[in-house]
Image (cartoon, rainbow, N blue to C red):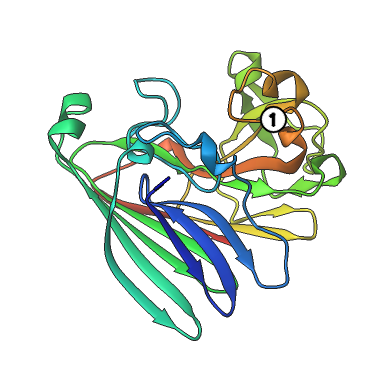
Amino acid sequence: MNYNLLEINHQLFSATILEQGAQIIHFQPNGKEPFLWSAPIDTYIHGKPFRGGIPICWPWFGKEQSPSHGFARITDWELESRIDSDNGVLLRWALRDSDASRAIWNHSFKLTLDMYLCETCTLRLKIDAPVATTGALHTYLYSANVREEWISGLGKSYIDSLLNDELVSATDEVLLIDKAIDRIYPHNLSETLLGDKLIVKHDNHSDVVAWNPWQEGVKNIADMSNDDYLHMVCIETARISNPFENIDSIGVEIS
C-alpha cells in the first residue's frame, strides 16, 4: 500500500516522513534508540490523524473547533526543496490555503516547515496568517519504559485538563509518570529533559504540554495497543497562552 511516505537512510540516521501533515513519524540516529514513538503504519488512513512522531497542530490547539487540533496535520503538504549532504538532510515543506481549508477556516495563510535531520532532529514552523492562531509541535517521544523515566524542565504549575482545567501548583519540578496526565505548563523554559536520554529544546513557545493516557486511557484509543502507554510520552512545544500573530514561528530540537 502506498502511504505517501518519504524514507531517508543517511549515514547518520534513518527517518520516515508522511506527506500528510509533513509529519515525521520515525527518527533514529545510527546506533541509538528511536527518538520518536508512532503507531503501526497500517493504522494510517489518509485524511485522518496519524498518531505518533511530530504532528503539527494548527490553526488551533485542542477541541475548540473541528477537526480537533486543526487541519494542518490531516492535509497533504508540498515538499518544496531537499538538500542532502554528508552532515545531514534539510527539507522544506509548505502548506497554503485552498478551497478545502477555506471551507473549514476562511482565511488565507502559508505555513513553511524546515526540517533539519542529522544526529539531531530539528523542526521550525513559520506561520504567515492574518489572524491570531494557536498550535503545537505535538512530539511523541519514545521510551523503553516510561515508568522508569523522569521529566524535568516543565515548570512549577500547570493547567490540568483532567481536572476541568484547574491551575495546579507542582509539588516537585521533576515529573514521574505513574498515572494518566494531560497538562499544559504555561512556561517558556527552554529545555525539557526525558531522563538522561533525550533533550527537547523549545524555541519561541509559550507552553509545554505533557500527555500520557496511561493504562485506563489507552483502552479507549483505537490506534494504540494496551501497552503502548509504557513506550511513549508527549512533550509538546506549544503556543496556547500566547497565540501566533501575523508572521510568527515556533521550533523544536530533539537530541
Asked whether, in this view, residue 173 is left or right of residue 16, the answer is: right
Question: What is the x, y in percent for residue 220?
Answer: 64, 17
**Residue found at x 47% / y 37%:** 44
Q: Position of residue 38 (x, y in %)?
A: 59, 44
Q: Residues within 10 Å of mark 1 (few under 14, many from 20)?
A: some
Q: Is residue 189 above or below residue 58?
A: below
In the image, taking residue 42 as reference, residue 94 lies left or right, namely left
Instruction: Give above or below for 32 relative to 57.
Output: below
Quarter where residue 27 is shown: bottom right
Considering the image in quadrants, where does the N terminus appear?
top left
| Residue extending farthest right | 148
Determine which residue is flagged by label 1.
225
* For residue 214, above or below residue 125: above
The image quarter in which residue 33 lies: bottom right
Query: Measuring 14% from the left and 40% from the top, which residue is drawn there?
Result: 108
Which residue is at the front of the view, 55 or 111? 55
Identify the residue shown where x is 65% and y is 15%.
163
What SS does tag 1 mark?
A: loop
Is 209 situated left or right of 3 in this image? right
Query: Which residue extends farthest top?
Result: 164
User: Which residue is more in the foreground, 100 or 175?
Assistant: 100
Res. 243 in view: no
> Is residue 85 visible in this depiction of the protein?
yes
Residue 6 in the image, given as x and y percentages of width and height = 41, 59
Instruction: Single out the residue that lies furthest toward the front.
Output: 1
Please name the residue shown 12% across and 33% down the image. Answer: 99
Q: The disc labelled 1 sits on which kind of residue?
A: Ser
Which residue is outermost to the bottom?
86
Horizontal relation, residue 84 to residue 39: left or right: left
